[in-house]
Image (cartoon, helix red, strand yellow):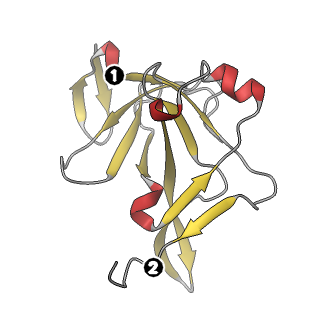
Amino acid sequence: MKVDTYLFGSIEVDPERIITFPNGLVAFEKSRRYTLIQEDAQGSSFTLQSLDEPGLALQIVDPTTLGFHYELQLSDAESSLLQWPAADDVVVMQVLYKKEIDGKADIVPNLRAPLVINLRARIGLQKVMENFRPNVTLSNLVSAV
C-alpha cells in the first residue's frame, strides 16, 4: 500500500506493519492506522506515521532509553482491546512533544499517556493516567553501571 506522507514523501507500507489504535490517540481520535518508521537501525526512536492523516507523524521512544520503567496495570477492557496479549508481545512507548521551558523549546516525553502496543496482533492503545502515580523507576544514566 502506497502512502503519501509529509515527512517521508511517498512510502510503501506493508499491510503486515500496520498498527491499529481502535480508540485513536489523544487529540487524534480519528486517526487510527499507523506504521512505525525507524530511520536509524541502531536508534531507539521511531516515527509513528499516521496512514489516515498523512500530515500526522509522532516521534516515539522506548522509555527505558530515557531511564524510565513503567509497571502499568491494564483494565479488563484495555486487555480485551489489546486481545489479551502475552507480556512478551507488549511494548510501552512514550510520545515526545515540544514544550516551551524558560522561553526555550525543548523535547520532552509524555509520561502521563504512554502507548501500549501488542506487537503480535498489531493493535495499541494510549494509556491515559488521570492520577500520575504509577510505578515509574528513574535510572541515573550518567553514572556507570
Q: Pinpoint residue 134: horizontal percent, then vertical percent.
A: 71, 58
Nearer to us in this view, 16 or 56: 16
Identify the residue position indicated by label 2 in the image.
140
Establish if 85 lies above or below 107: above
Query: Residue 63 in the image: x percent, y percent?
Result: 47, 57
Quarter of the image where one finds residue 8: top left
Classify mark 1: residues with Cα within 10 Å, few (<14), some (14-19) or many (20+).
few
Residue 93 versus residue 143 in the image, above or below: above
In the displayed orientation, state which residue is furthest to the left.
41
Quadrant of image for the N terminus: top left
Count every numbered label the image shows and give the total: 2
Which residue in the protein does label 1 denote?
A: 17
- Residue 139 appears left or right of 7: right
Q: Crowding near pointer 2: few (<14 within 10 Å), some, many (20+)?
A: few
Residue at image position (59%, 54%) is 70
At 36% across and 83% down in the image, what residue appears? 142
Residue at figure coordinates x 45%, y 22% from the top left: 122
Amino acid tagged 2: Asn
Callout 2: helix, strand or loop?
Answer: loop
Name the foreground residue: 105 vs 61: 61
Q: Secondary structure at mark 1?
A: helix
User: First in sequence: mark 2 or mark 1?
Assistant: 1
